[in-house]
Amino acid sequence: MNMDTQTEDKQLHSSAVLAQPKARSYEIFMSFVKYHQNGECDTTGMISKTCYAAWLSTRVPVPKKPEESFRRSLLGILTGCDQRKPFPPKVESSILNVLRKKEIWPCFRDLDCKIGLRGIKNRGYHESRISPGMDPNRIHEEAIVLNNSRAHDTSMVTSGSINNEYLILLKSVEMAHLSSNEEMPIAVRRLAASITGNILPDAFIGLLRSVGPDYFNGELYRSLELMDAEQDIRLQTAFLVPAAFEFDKMRNVGTLILERDFNIVDANLDVQILGESLISKNWIGISASRMQSALLIIYELPVLRQFGTAWSRKIVRLPSGLEKMLDIKTNLIPGNRMQVMFQDSSHLYAPILNRARNFV
């Protein structure tokens, strides 16, 4: 580094008077975002010399490797790592386009620093939560519309506000698009189609509140894409959703009442049969695997909706961690509720239960 460059860098550092001491990196970066009248934004200022100087002026003590610290700070917010507040979707989309260019960042061009030369490969926070081929900006905007249309909701979704309700709305909107996304495996499209076709939107939101917005995620989608039903009876339609069977007359049959979001609101003989109460639990949430839940949504719900009754088998993981195989008969009942009649058949499926923990 030559003397002129060192002098210029010191001047930039000392002249960044607009940045308040100890200001958060997020606030500094966002202050260099320019918004256009058409709603688009320009984030090139985030990697300008002025922004770098403003950021550096708030670091006390000055980092030993300031260029690398600046890079880590910007990428940390971009990816939302370590529970950092991420940039709003539109800002994220814009800065990703800037940082993926294979060129040294403007703030480092007069320094002995090559940051930016290879372009970044990181995925943004919002980008990573949206399935491939989908536009995070569009999903975000539709989530805002969905939130504003739900008068009972007390958590407004605004640009940059990241909370559990927002993530739930994102997932709900995303699922509505997945069924027609040609980039997704057919099993994933069928899952999305069954959810949107057989579960009311508010019920699906209620389900996500119980099981979490990441219940239906990339790991599950990859498992559906790679599953081999011929090698695993747990994945076979005939096993999961048989045409019909009879309960063992010598064993107790319990009953659960589910709301349309699959929350269990009433139960009979659950404690006697399973040793634990299932009231207030979520029927999908206690499945031993998300893969199993997805397949039952794909195969069972359409049958239940068409005929009002469906037979199925399911491995449940009880609150204690104990796993049971259940034979199940589900009936639609008035009030958009479901009646689940179940019988413990674990004694018949010991080999399958022994493999349950390897089930995604």
Image (cartoon, rainbow, N blue to C red):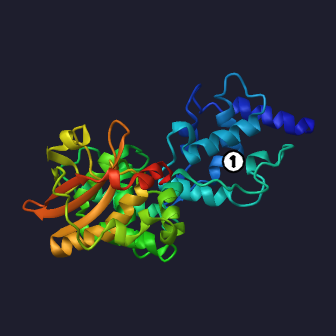
Q: Residues within 10 Å of mark 1 (few under 14, many from 20)?
A: some
Q: Is residue 26 above or below residue 264?
A: above
Residue 29 locus on image (x, y percent): 58, 43
Instruction: Name which quarter of the figure residue 329 lies in.
Output: bottom left
List the residue tagged with mark 1: 48
The residue positioned 7% from the left and 62% from the top of the image is 334
231 or 150, which is in the foreground?
A: 231
Q: Residue farthest to the top?
A: 61
Instruction: Name which quarter of the figure residue 154 lies in.
Output: top left
Residue 181 locus on image (x, y percent): 45, 74
Q: Residue farthest to the left?
A: 334
The residue positioned 54% from the left and 44% from the top of the image is 80
Q: Amino acid at mark 1?
A: Ser
Residue 338 locus on image (x, y percent): 16, 59
268 or 180, which is in the foreground?
A: 268
Point out the image quarter for the N terminus.
Answer: top right
